[in-house]
Image (cartoon, grey):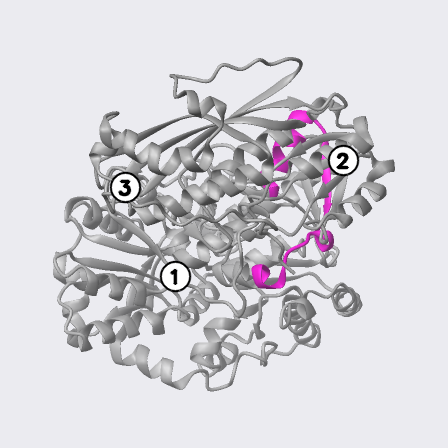
Amino acid sequence: MKHLTEYRDADLVENLLHQLKKVTTKPWNIMEVCGGQTHGLVKHGILEMLPEGITMIHGPGCPVCVTPVSHIDQAIELALEKDVILCSYGDMLRVPGSRMSLLQARAKGADIRIMYSPLEAVHIARENPDRQVVFFAVGFETTAPANALSVVQAEKAGLKNYAILSAHVLVPPAIEAIMLDKETRVHGFLAAGHVCTVMGLSEYYPLVATYKIPVVVTGFEPVDLLEGILMVVKQLEKGEHRLENQYKRVVWPDGNKQAVALIHSVFENRDREWRGIGSIPMSGLFLRDEYRDYDAQFRFGPATATAVEQVECLSGDVMKGKIKPVECPHFGTTCTPEHPVGAPMVSSEGACAAYYNFSSQHRMQELK
Amino acid sequence: MIKNQPVMRFTCPMPQTDFDTITIGHGSGGKLTRQLLESMVFPLLNNEWLAGQGDGAVLELRGKMAFSTDSFVVSPVFFPGGNIGDLAINGTVNDLAMCGAEPDYISLSFILEEGLPITEFWEILLSIRNACDAAGVRVITGDTKVVERGKGDKIFINTTGIGRVHPGAKLGEAMVRPGDKVIVSGPLARHGIAIMSIRKGLEFETQILSDTRPLHDICRLLLYTYGAGIRMFRDPTRGGVATVLHEIADKARLGIDLDEKNIPVEEQVAGACEMLGLDPMYVANEGLFIAIVDGGLAGDILTELHRWPNGGQAAILGTVTENHPGMVVLNSAIGGRRVLPLITGEQLPRIC
């Protein structure tokens, strides 16, 4: 398939691996920030192909994994107790809240619908004027423009029955939090390509300068990922730290200005709680006061029950790269995709689920 | 190229009826039920058993028989490439074919939702008739119930089939040996993506059609020609190819090694899967089968399949191995290696 097969080319991959082997003289830990990249690395079997010494650390860029339990509980409460039509992206549905998941709530009779776009939810609101419709606005900068647009469209249409439950998070503050963590083992970053498609590159220069760390904006296909890793390693081996763009076919330095303007007109940055990690300053997008009427938190009030995260889950340590999923005592024993203890075991972008499902290190080990 | 439609299709104008939608009365067993059956169902499906209109059909059976049942609840009822009617016939015909059997008789039960337009019911009946003709199977008993509006989803169909097992068929996981090859009869994921595309209102340059079709002819031909060289058949419907291969590996207590580059997926379908965040290996098929065959015969069998009008993209997916029993391992197109997991529930689309 055009624009896909050429980035899954076995010869190119072999060539990149060869170069990587040649330039690597020391062990390096590289964090891929985005869950989509984790998924790609594991799905294509790349982790097993990397030269010894290159360790990939799977970052917190799985939106499903970092959405706080309290938000999931609130979404469930809206759907179960307030007769709201709750619209959500698909992979949010199986994530455990403190009492149940959205999928379990649906089985109990809640009206929960899977969407590919928040604009579908606006359409549902228009079609159901006597029902309240809430879109569970989860995601990084990639989904923020469409979610912002849904609010703008609802306002233009004069809809009084549409709101979003925003759990939006941002990548650069997360990178900063990882670098500020004294135990961090990360030497370089692959930044999330599609986030930069929207936001551009400007936010990453200060991170590179302040923390003296290579950052390479990288795509999601095998050739992209290996090229991104190679670019980071080359910098590290030379003792350099620069921002580079591997994903030039999709990422422009200025990003998508219209989308950025839309995000800023609807949302503002505030401190945000990340599941498993804690509060990160200015890392969340919240609806501006002008759009308060479209904020589910404002319309329906805050959640009645405050949830407590299951303490056993070590997802924070996994997402900060302190431990590998397989090093968690619950991995594959008390925590499986059927009975997840924490969110990273649920989403296909979650590091634990990726390891459990495809891997590789723990299961392929048995094969050798 | 997508070939799916039987060459000859029976068409018939809808008979005059006094009603334009299904009402509760059509399931009462009384006059309305009889009107529905006599004006619409019997004229299309008639045979000596239905003509008798008894409580059941009396059959004389000899030899080894296969027996299979399935219920069909697809939504939407009409989809590109078919509808619930041909799906219900082909589904049971194929379940019998996977047992190495020739479908003979089938039962047909409807659960209709009040309000179903008669024109839609007629179109479904016509598809049933055409699918029966294509498969050479006769509907010999049936039932019609009607549920109140909101208690169903237009129409649910159950079919149960009986068929004679081919004398040369010795099929099952117990027959699978290391070194056997895994063959798939065509491209993956068409049915599931056809359904998803209308549920999600997606439009592609060319429409993706469901692959619903009967498979008994080709299975019979393979059994006739290769006998015990065919170890087993399975049709990868719900859960897709990955789920079926998992079950085979698990029951046979053997491993399966797959080559990703050999997996046939049409470009349109691959594109849709990428967009929707789905893996074609887990998407449903309705006119596809997996055959585990003697490794030495795999090349010949593949050639045979390529001659079948629907088998142009048939491929050898991989090999059965003594290594890693119970596991399906995929050699990725770029030379990596990973386990193909069994997924927990339905595939949920990813956020980004």
Q: Where residue A179 appears, x then y in whole percent?
A: 48, 66
Magenta span contains residue A141: no
Q: Where residue A96 appears, x then y in whole percent?
A: 35, 43
Q: Is residue A33 above or below residue A247?
A: above
Amino acid identity at mark 3: Ala
Amino acid identity at mark 1: Tyr
Asked which secondary structure carries label 1, the reply is loop
- Res. B254 image quadrant: top right
Q: Where residue A259 appears, x then y in whole percent?
A: 37, 80
Magenta-colored span: B241-270
Asked which secondary structure carries label 3, the reply is helix
- Same chain, marks 1 and 2? no
Does residue A2 appear anywhere in the picture?
yes
Which residue was labeled with disc 2? B222
Asked which secondary structure carries label 2, the reply is helix
Q: Of callouts 3 and 1, which one flags the residue occurring earlier in the amino acid sequence?
A: 3
Residue A41: mark: none
- Same chain, marks 3 and 1? yes
**Can you tell which of label 3 and label 1 is closer to the viewer?**
1
How packed mark 3 is, by other alpha carbons closer than 10 Å (few <14, some 14-19, many 20 or more), is some
Q: Are marks 3 and 1 in contact (CB under 8 Å)?
A: no
How packed mark 1 is, by other alpha carbons closer than 10 Å (few <14, some 14-19, many 20 or more), is some
Q: Where residue B15 appears, x then y in whole percent?
A: 34, 45
Residue A105: mark: 3
Which residue was labeled with disc 1? A116
Specify the subunit that label 2 lies on. Answer: B
Amino acid identity at mark 2: Leu
**Can you tell which of label 1 and label 2 is closer to the viewer?**
2
Residue shown at the point (64%, 70%) measured from the top left: A224
Q: Are marks 2 and 3 in contact (CB under 8 Å)?
A: no
